[in-house]
């Protein structure tokens, strides 16, 4: 069994509110289909159907304040209660004292040491590699984990050769970096992601535009971001084989589900499991750090 891990930055489970919750003012046909036309809201409990298991998951981790990306992502990718370790939520980048933990425990490193084939599929422009070479060290948890673990970061060359995915799904944003890239549809991106995932034991795709859209309070930006994500899921699941691939979708904190505020929220976040043994893990997921151990179990890497 192979695992595809889709990390969504800043997606919580909000109220059924067609004014401020983009999930309820955007037509999302694929999401509605896999949830049997009943998109989850703040009042939803665990949902299971023939396609998925949905588990509302705690992102506060017993620490006061609004959850942040640095600590939330460290919790997810390292299986620790990061905010409790430093007595606060912190972000967007990991707190300095968390870096040794990331270096030692990040999921990329652990799986690589177990002989698993690991890939982080987000492609980076040359400007980012210049940033690395400049000696600067402000990286997200995913990027830092790869750099610390010797996992090669994908380039424009990988993107052109269909071995990587753009952070914005379609690749439209590459023009501002000086690249003449022909964008693809979200559906095509989903198909590509599925094919890439079948070549690896563990594949990660990070979509951070959901968090940007939440901070923006811009309805059109939020709507278009979710439409891209919906199209990605449509392409991903078009020829999906649950015998070959286990899909996990999770977020680090709430934000996009309430565009009446620019800040993060205290809402629980969605964990979505799609795969043959999806129901096996329902009772094992209480907070966002638990997903780390689910991944190790699926890949027989404990």
Image (cartoon, rainbow, N blue to C red):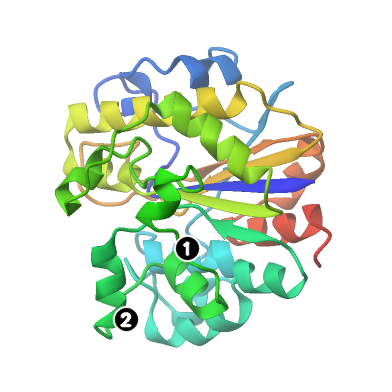
- Mark 1: few/some/many CA within 10 Å (<14, 14-19, 20+): many
Q: Which residue appears at 31% of the width and 44% of the height?
A: 209
Q: Is residue 186 left or right of residue 248?
A: left
Q: Is residue 22 left or right of residue 122?
A: left
Helix, strand or loop under label 1: helix
Q: Which residue is mark 2?
A: 137
Q: Which residue is mark 1?
A: 73
Helix, strand or loop under label 2: loop
- Check contact, mark 1 vs mark 2: CB within 8 A: no
In front here: 98 or 152?
Answer: 152
Whether residue 70 is situated above or below residue 256 in the rendered picture: below
Q: Which mark is residue 88?
A: none
Residue 71 visible within the image: no
Q: Earlier in the sequence, mark 1 or mark 2?
A: 1
In the rendering, at what x and y percent does residue 264 appear?
A: 31, 51
Q: CA distance from mark 1 to mark 2?
A: 17 Å
Q: Which residue appears at 44% of the width and 73% of the height?
A: 144
Tag nearer the camera, 1 or 2: 2
Residue 140 visible within the image: yes
Q: Which residue appears at 51% of the width and 28% of the height?
A: 233
Q: Quadrant of residue 34?
A: top right
In front here: 153 or 264?
Answer: 153
């Amino acid at each position: 069994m192979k695992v595809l891990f889709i990390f969504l930055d800043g997606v919580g489970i909000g109220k059924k509110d067609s004014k401020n919750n983009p999930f309820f003012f955007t037509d999302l046909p694929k999401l509605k289909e896999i949830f049997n036309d009943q998109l989850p809201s703040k009042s939803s409990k665990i949902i299971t159907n023939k396609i998925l298991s949905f588990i509302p998951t705690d992102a506060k981790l017993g620490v006061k304040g609004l959850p942040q990306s640095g600590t939330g992502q460290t919790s997810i990718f390292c299986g620790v209660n990061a905010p409790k370790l430093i007595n606060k939520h912190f972000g967007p980048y990991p707190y300095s004292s968390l870096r040794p933990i990331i270096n030692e425990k990040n999921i990329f490193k652990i799986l690589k040491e177990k002989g698993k084939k690991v890939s982080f599929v987000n492609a980076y422009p040359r400007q980012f590699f210049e940033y690395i070479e400049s000696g600067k060290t402000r990286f997200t948890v995913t990027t830092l984990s790869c750099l610390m673990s010797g996992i090669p970061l994908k380039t424009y060359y990988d993107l052109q050769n269909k071995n990587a995915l753009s952070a914005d799904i379609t690749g439209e944003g590459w023009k501002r970096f000086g690249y003449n890239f022909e964008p693809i549809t979200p559906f095509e991106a989903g198909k590509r992601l599925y094919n890439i995932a079948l070549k690896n034991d563990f594949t990660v795709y990070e979509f951070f535009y959901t968090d940007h859209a939440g901070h923006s309070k811009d309805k059109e930006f939020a709507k278009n971001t979710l439409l891209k994500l919906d199209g990605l899921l449509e392409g991903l699941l078009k020829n999906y084989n649950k015998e070959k691939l286990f899909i996990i979708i999770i977020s680090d904190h709430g934000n996009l589900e309430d565009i009446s505020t620019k800040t993060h929220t205290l809402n629980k976040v969605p964990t979505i499991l799609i795969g043959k043994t999806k129901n096996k893990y329902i009772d094992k997921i209480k907070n966002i750090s638990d997903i780390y151990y689910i991944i190790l179990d699926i890949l027989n890497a404990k």
